[in-house]
Image: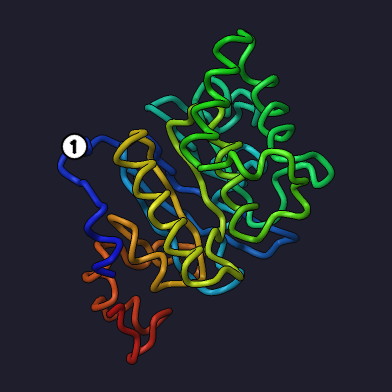
Amino acid sequence: MALIKKFRIKSFKDQEAILELKKISMFYNKRQILNNLDLKINQQEVLGMLGPNGVGKSTLFHIITGLKSPSYGEVLIDGVDCTKIPIYERATRFKIGYVPQHGGFIQDLNLIENLKLVAEIHIKDKNIRKSKIEKIISQFEFDPLLKIKAKHLSGGQKKKLVISMALINEPKILLLDEPFAALDILTIKMLQEIIVSLQSLEKITVVVCDHQARDLLSCVDRAIVLSNGKVIASGGPSEIIKDSIARSAYFGDEFKIN
């Protein structure tokens, strides 16, 4: 944990909610996934979401982006009720970026073609578009990879590509769905550093959902644990693993982060 913690800068963050979920409930075929859930996420916060399979973490991401509508409840972004606002408008007007667990790029296009494709959708001015792509290439050290088809990139390179594509639109909020899944230790550390730099340098609010609890807790300011469709625990990394309810529902008695 110490390896990542030194990259973190917390003093500049405002304690003002940029995203708020109010009384969110969600049903699939009469099965309740989310149950009257409330959650506030502060500006420039790195928030981690933890919980067992099927608890509703990805569903929450879909509700935030507008991919799905909640059965009940409200989604507020910058204080505006976005519950019925469509996905494209949320991405452009409210600057929501989403990195799915799988895919997110065109397999048969090379890296630079994927970046240009997204840039052409979001940025009309050619000069601004070119400048933004050049910044992304430099930021992610993509120069040696530009002509490689996305399907031939390594797991870590693919994840970097999808994150960079989500950044083209300069999001205020970036959602990362299981970014550490099936990656090696060095690649995970690289992604952790990217997440923290997005917060400290780009001033982005980042929400991370992953089953790799230790990796997630190493790069977040606050974590929540979901169970039975609700937030059952919330706190800093060292606090939440000591929470008796979180340990009982998710971590277990033997879990440690260092």
Quarter of the image where one finds residue 253: bottom left
**Mark 1 element type:** loop
> Who's the residue at 21% across and 46% down the image?
9
* Left or right position of 174 against 224: right
Q: Is residue 106 above or below residue 124?
A: below
The quarter in which the N terminus is drawn is: bottom left
Which colour assignment does the render follow? rainbow
Count of numbered circles on the image: 1
Estimate the x, y position of residue 18 in percent, counting from the top left: 36, 34
Estimate the x, y position of residue 104 in percent, counting from the top left: 70, 45
The quarter in which the C terminus is drawn is: bottom left
Quarter of the image where one finds residue 84: top right
Say few, some or many: other residues with alpha carbon within 10 Å of mark 1 (under 14 / 14 to 19 / 20 or more).
few
> Who's the residue at 41% across and 57% down the image?
192
Between 144 and 151, the one lying in front of the other is 144
Residue identifier under label 1: 12
Estimate the x, y position of residue 32 in percent, counting from the top left: 61, 62
Residue type pointed to by label 1: Phe
Q: Is residue 168 above or below residue 25?
A: above
Between 126 and 81, the one lying in front of the other is 126
* Left or right position of 124 against 229: right
Estimate the x, y position of residue 164 in percent, counting from the top left: 56, 39
